[in-house]
Amino acid sequence: MEELVEIVVDGRSLAVSKSTIVLQALRDHGIDIPALCYYPSLEAYGSCGLCMVEIWSTVIWKPRHACLLEVEDGLQIKTATPRLQRLRAWIAQILLHGRPFHNSEIEGLLLKLVQDETADGQVLSGSTTEGCILCGLCIRMCRKIGKDRLTYLGRGKNLRIGLVPGAGNKASCGNCCACRNICPMGFISPDAEHAFKARLYKE
């Protein structure tokens, strides 16, 4: 039988599986927390930052990534405080640097997070990865299925995702579509070879 523990979310007690993470536990109870870099069957990474919640820690409330937080008995959580709304709006502004996106629904979500918290709804401009938010889902999925053809390249403002060439500098990529199907922004179309122009090695 599945072991349950009790957590308190926004003042409400919930019985959740001890073997799950906070983000999934919240979603299982109909509490919608935005998260673009999370997928249940993949290891959590916490790159998008939108799933921030506050947890009670001895004397103060601390912001934490819900996708990286393990459930434990008695855990107290807040999901919609003014501080969290400001954090999500700031994070959404950063993610919107990657516009334009193929997925208009996700772009609309990010814009709403900014506009709900910012008086003029202004979004910062400038992008080095147009159409991609560097969430890393494609890299983790490619690794999980055993191909391991995608990797991060560069750092800071130059961070990007590149395709590792195969034998003879030819990338045997594009047939499984696993990365394309998991990309939240619809960026990988029709496949990773076309989406990621950067290469790990010079050809």
Image (cartoon, rainbow, N blue to C red):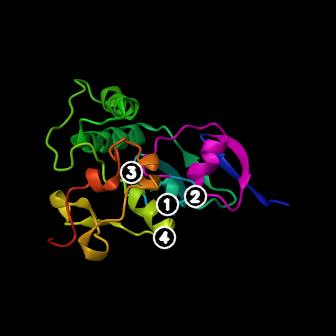
Q: CA distance from mark 1 to mark 3?
A: 11 Å
Residue at the spot 48% in from the left edge and 70% down from the top edge: 146
Residue 75 shown left or right of residue 4 in the figure: left
Tag of residue 2: none
The kind of residue on which mark 2 rests is: Ser
Residue denoted by label 1: 44
Q: Residues within 10 Å of mark 3 (few under 14, many from 20)?
A: many
Looking at this rendering, what residue extends furthest in the right direction?
1
Q: CA distance from mark 3 to mark 2?
A: 19 Å
Quick one: label 2 or label 4, which is nearer the N terminus?
A: 2
Q: Which residues are magenta?
A: 11-38
Q: CA distance from mark 2 to mark 4?
A: 14 Å
Q: Nearer the viewer, mark 4 or mark 3?
A: 4
Q: CA distance from mark 1 to mark 4?
A: 18 Å
Quick one: label 3 or label 2, which is nearer the N terminus?
A: 2
The kind of residue on which mark 4 rests is: Gly
